[in-house]
Amino acid sequence: QVQLQESGPGLVKPSQTLSLTCTVSGGSISTDSFYWSWIRQHPEKGLEWIGYIYSSGSTYYNPSLRSRVSMSIDTSRNQFSLSLRSVTATDTAVYYCVRSGGGPWGQGTLVTVSS
Amino acid sequence: DIQMTQSPSSVSASVGDRVTITCRASQGVSNWLAWYQQRPGKAPKLLIYPASSLQSGVPSRFSGSGSGTDFTLTINSLQPEDSATYYCQQATAFPRTFGGGTKVEIK
């Protein structure tokens, strides 16, 4: 079955760029049937939807983060990526990559913003 | 954005009890409502989507109902493994938005 796995640095300095990659296995990312999302969860808090990307490269970002977010997709590697610029401590969270329709979800990766 | 409000924020119940969680949307979402279960340290797991459709492999003691703005997740005969936080999410508009969560504890 389809599985997703996040990867990237667990520690990012304030004002720098957070970069994460999600690798999809067990199925092709090159499908119009699904879009691929990033969702984050602040420590002991609720869930915040960051945005999505289609295999065509079409994106939608949460307006609350739109000025700092970009997503890309590499269909040859079956991966999609998240970049979040100018991070602060409030960006510390567990970041999940998720396929549309409710899942599957990656296991999540904790990113801490700290000097 | 569509605001999703869950209640209660936490509930403590005994094994075998029935637990009901409600979710209210700030505007109508038809039946495009998902329920997730999240155990500590784990990713959320989809239980029900859309509003009343149980996902494959989810125990039948879970059920969902509602449409428009008011939805309910019911856990019949609560089991120890149901101890988790439950979230609703609307899937009709972007950005997708989640409820604040309901923590279910076993007495």
Image (cartoon, grey):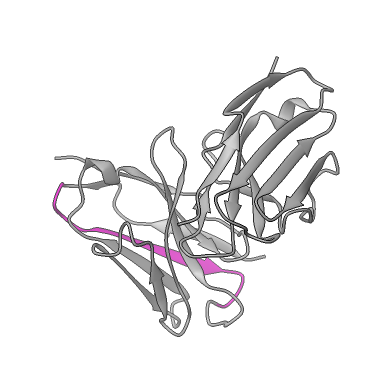
Q: Is residue A76 above or below residue A13?
A: below
x 50%, y 69%: residue: A36
Q: Is residue B44 above or below residue B92?
A: above
Q: Is residue B39 visible?
A: no
Q: Is residue B50 above or below residue A77?
A: above
Asked whether A27 or A95 is in front, the reply is A95
- Magenta span includes A23: yes
> Residue A24's x, y, as percent?
52, 68
Q: Is residue A20 left or right of residue A54?
A: left
Q: Is residue A23 left or right of residue B38?
A: left
> Residue B58's x, y, as percent?
78, 47
x 73%, y 41%: residue: B73
Q: Is residue B28 above or below residue B44?
A: below
- Magenta span includes B66: no
Residue range (magenta):
A14-28
x 56%, y 37%: residue: B101
